[in-house]
Structure formats: structure tokens, C-alpha cells
Amino acid sequence: MKNRPFRSRIGFALAGLRSAFRRENSFRTHCLFAGAALGALLVLRPAPAWWALVALAIALVMALELVNSALEALIDLLHPGQHPEIGIIKDMLAGAVLVASLAALLVALALVVAHRGLLAA
């Protein structure tokens, strides 16, 4: 599987995104919020730096959700039973997504405050 052509690797990545969208409610929810953020950017039309900050925040949340989903699927495959340590690991993965999501909300709040002229852009 190593050293495949770039086009093949992109295909694998897109298949992973499709799988996550089909299988994971949380990923679909994050996609919905990403679309709402894009809509807000189109309405507010902030400076390019804000577009970059919002894009990075969205990418971080989505990437962590993909990692969370992939690791949870792997964990469930390797150890289908319940185990306290596995529960803790899954909670930590979910915590990582939560931290990124809260950071994304702070970026959104800062954008709104800046757009209202309460913060220097």
C-alpha cells in the first residue's frame, strides 16, 4: 500500500471522508456547523485573516473528529468488550474534539465582536 500515486492517495482520503460522513453523526454535525460558519463569513465579509482563522478552526475540529472516529472504530474492532481503560481512552479522544470545538467557538465569538467594532481587527 505504500508509495501509491498521489491520485490514489487522494482517492483513499476522499473515501475516508465519505465513510465518516455516512457513519458518524458527530462528523455530520461538524459539517453542518462548518457550513454555517461559511455562511456567516459570506454575510459578514471579514478581512482575509478572519477567513484563515475560521478555516483553521474548522479544519482542526474536523481533523480531530476524524481521528476520534478512526481510533474509536479501531478500538472497538480490537477490543469489542467493555473495559474501564478503553472508556477512559474514548473519553480523552472526545475531550480533544471538545477542546478544539470550544476554541472554534472562541474564534467565532472574536469574529462577531470584531465585526461589531468592539475589537480591533
Image: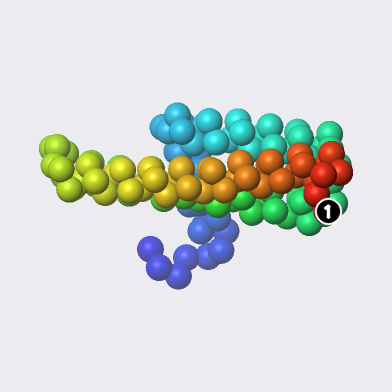
Q: Nearer the viewer, residue 6 or 47?
A: 47
Quarter of the view holding residue 116 = top right
Residue at 77% over, 51% down: 50
As drawn, the residue found furthest toward the front would be 118
Dot 1 falls on a residue whose secondary structure is loop
Q: Nearer the viewer, residue 77 or 105?
A: 105
| Residue 106 pos. (x, y %) | 63, 45
Residue at 31% over, 43% down: 91
Q: Amino acid at mark 1?
A: Ala
Note whether residue 100 is visible.
yes
| Residue 53 pos. (x, y %) | 70, 53
- Horizontal side of residue 88 vs 8, given as left or right: left
Note whether residue 21 is visible.
no
Label 1 CA crowd tier, 10 Å (few <14, some 14–19, many 20+): few
| Residue 95 pos. (x, y %) | 39, 45
**Residue that label 1 marks:** 120
Q: Nearer the viewer, residue 72 or 91?
A: 91
Quarter of the view holding residue 117 = top right
| Residue 78 pos. (x, y %) | 18, 47
Up the image or down, 51 lies above or below 35; here it is below
